Amino acid sequence: MSNFVAPEQFAAANKANIETLLTLANTAFASAERLAALNLNTARSLLEDGVANTKALLAVKDVQELVNLQASLAQPIVEKAVAYARSVYEISSQSQEEMGKVFEGQVAEMNKGVASALDKAAKSAPAGSDVAVAAVKSAIAAANSAYDSMSKAAKQVAEIAEANVAAATNATVKAVSTSSKAAAKKAA
């Protein structure tokens, strides 16, 4: 029995690695494309809003009207900034999730390969080496368990952070809305 990798196995491994790299590259390009589109649309919207706001400011006839206009302009700007931040976060989260799935698939394949190699080594190992093989298998199982635990913990942390960001952005929008209304009432 040979311990060397057959040319077919080597070619299959290279093909799988190229497929993985293509998947990662396509994910990165799709995310970059979505971010570029978001940035262009946001820039266009900001330009249009800036022109409209400038025209509105130039049409102001007294201080009262200026205060009311300022109060009415603040909230949409904050809401658009929050919407932009949410979109960027969503794009990056989806990209990270897709890349994480690819990475998890690679780890699973690597684990299968290591397990297969261990089984082959155990079959050709000298008598009495069962304890060593069992120890290596146990160490691999412990490492996989630790990886799974860390992966689950990281996902929980990400979910908590996402919930906190959502709560903070909602509070910010509400605070700006309340202060805009208060400023408008004060000016009236």
Image (cartoon, rainbow, N blue to C red):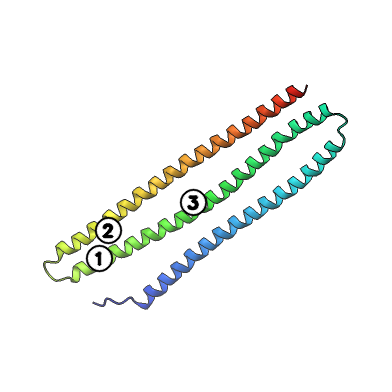
What residue is pinned by disc 1? 118
Residue extending furthest toward the front:
63
Looking at marks 1 and 3 on the same chain, the residue that comes earlier in the sequence is marked by 3
Quarter of the figure that contains the N terminus: bottom left
Q: Secondary structure at mark 1?
A: helix
Looking at marks 2 and 3 on the same chain, the residue that comes earlier in the sequence is marked by 3
Q: Secondary structure at mark 3?
A: helix
Mark 3 is on which residue type? Glu
Mark 2 is on which residue type? Ile
CB atoms of marks 2 and 1 within 8 Å: yes
Against 156, residue 139 (above or below) is below
What residue is pinned by disc 2? 140
What residue is pinned by disc 3? 97
Image-based side of 95 in relation to 71, left or right: left
Against 101, residue 68 (above or below) is above
The alpha-carbon separation of the residues under discs 1 and 3 comes to: 31 Å
